[in-house]
């Protein structure tokens, strides 16, 4: 494959061919947008194809997208949350958006914000089902 200049993603025919021969237990995929029915979108056709192949080669798929991506669409739809393990999003995700996704059959996990202790040490992110 080739490294895209606009982001640290590998894309192209060689990357896609390699993904067809690989097997992953778990894949974490990013998304540019997720609509209220659980469709997952990407702006780039190359990345949409690559993410489709990644999802097909994984036993379980998690989509990672912050709350700014929810309730939106983009040019290329590459999957549905209902077909995958869950969406992982941030604590700022609105109740209405999450309710719509759950009603559509998607599982949602909210990652809580990182906290800083009184001594200035960062704590681990807390992830919990919602």
Image: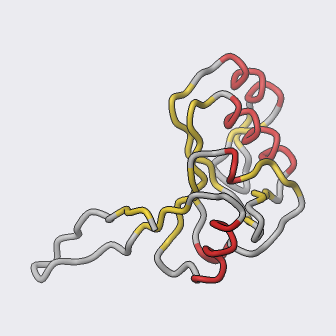
**Residue drawn at 83 percent across, 44 percent down:** 46
Residue 100: x percent and y percent? 69, 73
Q: Quadrant of residue 99?
A: bottom right
**Residue drawn at 60 percent across, 53 percent down:** 63
Count of numbered tags:
0
Residue 95: x percent and y percent? 58, 82
Which residue in the rendered view is the most extreme toward the top?
21
Residue 55: x percent and y percent? 68, 37
Q: Is residue 97 or residue 32 the one in the foreground?
A: 97
101, above or below 31, in the image: below
In this rendering, position of residue 14 left or right of residue 120 = right
Q: Is residue 97 or residue 52 the one in the foreground?
A: 97
Q: Is residue 2 or residue 53 the one in the foreground?
A: 53
Q: Quadrant of residue 38?
A: bottom right
Residue 30: x percent and y percent? 63, 54
Q: Quadrant of residue 69?
A: bottom right
**Residue drawn at 77 percent across, 48 percent down:** 79
- Quadrant including the N terminus: top right
21, above or below 61, in the image: above
Which residue in the rendered view is the most extreme toward the left?
119
**Residue drawn at 68 percent across, 35 percent down:** 54
118, above or below 125, in the image: below
119, above or below 51, in the image: below
In this rendering, position of residue 125 left or right of residue 15 = left
């Amino acid at each position: 494959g080739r490294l895209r200049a606009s982001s640290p993603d590998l894309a192209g025919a060689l990357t896609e061919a390699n993904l067809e021969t690989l097997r992953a237990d778990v894949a974490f995929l990013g998304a540019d947008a997720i609509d209220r029915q659980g469709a997952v979108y990407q702006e780039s056709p190359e990345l949409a194809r690559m993410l489709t192949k990644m999802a097909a080669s994984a036993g379980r798929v998690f989509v990672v997208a912050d709350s700014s991506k929810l309730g939106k669409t983009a040019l290329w739809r590459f999957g549905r949350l209902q077909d995958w393990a869950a969406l992982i999003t941030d604590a700022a995700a609105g109740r209405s958006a999450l309710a719509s996704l759950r009603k559509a059959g998607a599982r949602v996990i909210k990652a809580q914000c990182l906290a800083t202790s009184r001594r200035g040490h960062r704590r681990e992110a807390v992830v919990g089902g919602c």
